[in-house]
Amino acid sequence: MLNSFSLEASEIKNLIIYEEPKKYVNLSFLDDKNNELKLNSFKGNVILLNFWATWCAPCKEEMPSLDLLQENNELNNLKIFPINIGKDNVNKASSFFNNLKIKNLNLYFDNPETLAKKLSLRGIPTTILFNKKGDEFARIVGSIDFSDQKFLDWLRKYD
């Protein structure tokens, strides 16, 4: 049986909502100084992991709207982590952000244990949403306009 959010969100392109949230253990990624960050340390927030690479044209297209989502004051409990999985170095990833005038997001990188593999990514961009308990409740496969009002209204219900 679908929950009410699924029905309301059915018009949002590329959005998959799970009836039963998926549980994971020991998910981590790296910041731009190679420090490991554990996903479960952000419990209590809605977490958005956006997987991208500098060579990915759809990633380039959606990144400015993701940057705007970061500064949306109506989503106080949303934590956004754009995670580079293209094996790009910090300088190349920083140049990508600078060229797109990304000013609200920080750089993060997949770790050698490959978070992308643990989460069964099939392509990029892919965005994975975790609820306040730290369970995956939705996934966006492909690019999306993060400033789309239908998406914002849907996301606000979880924040």
Image (cartoon, rainbow, N blue to C red):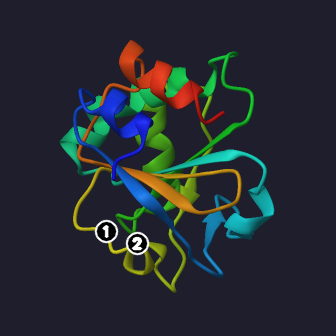
- Residue displayed at 51% across by 60% down: 136
Residue drawn at point x = 26 percent, y = 39 percent: 143
Asked if residue 136 is positioned above or below residue 100 in the image, the reply reads below
Is residue 10 visible from the viewing direction of this image?
yes
**Looking at the picture, how far across and down is residue 144, in whole percent?**
29, 32
User: Decide: marks 2, 1 in contact (CB < 8 A)?
Assistant: yes
What's the residue type where badge 2 is placed? Ala
Q: From the viewer's perspective, is 150 left or right of 115?
A: left
**Residue holding disc 2:** 116
Where disc 1 sits, the SS reads: loop
Task: Count neighbours of disc 1 (C-alpha within 10 A) and say few if under 14, some if 14 to 19, many if 20 or more.
Answer: some
Q: Which quadrant of the structure image shows residue 69?
A: top right
Q: Residue at x 57, y 77 (%)?
A: 24
Residue 127 in view = no
Mark 1, residue position: 121
Vertical placement of residue 9 versus 20, above or below: above
Mark 2 neighbour class, 10 Å CA radius: few under 14, some 14 to 19, many 20 or more: some
Q: Please identify the quarter of the rendering in which residue 123 is found.
A: bottom left
- Position of residue 153 relative to residue 86, above or below, is above
Q: Residue furthest bottom?
A: 113
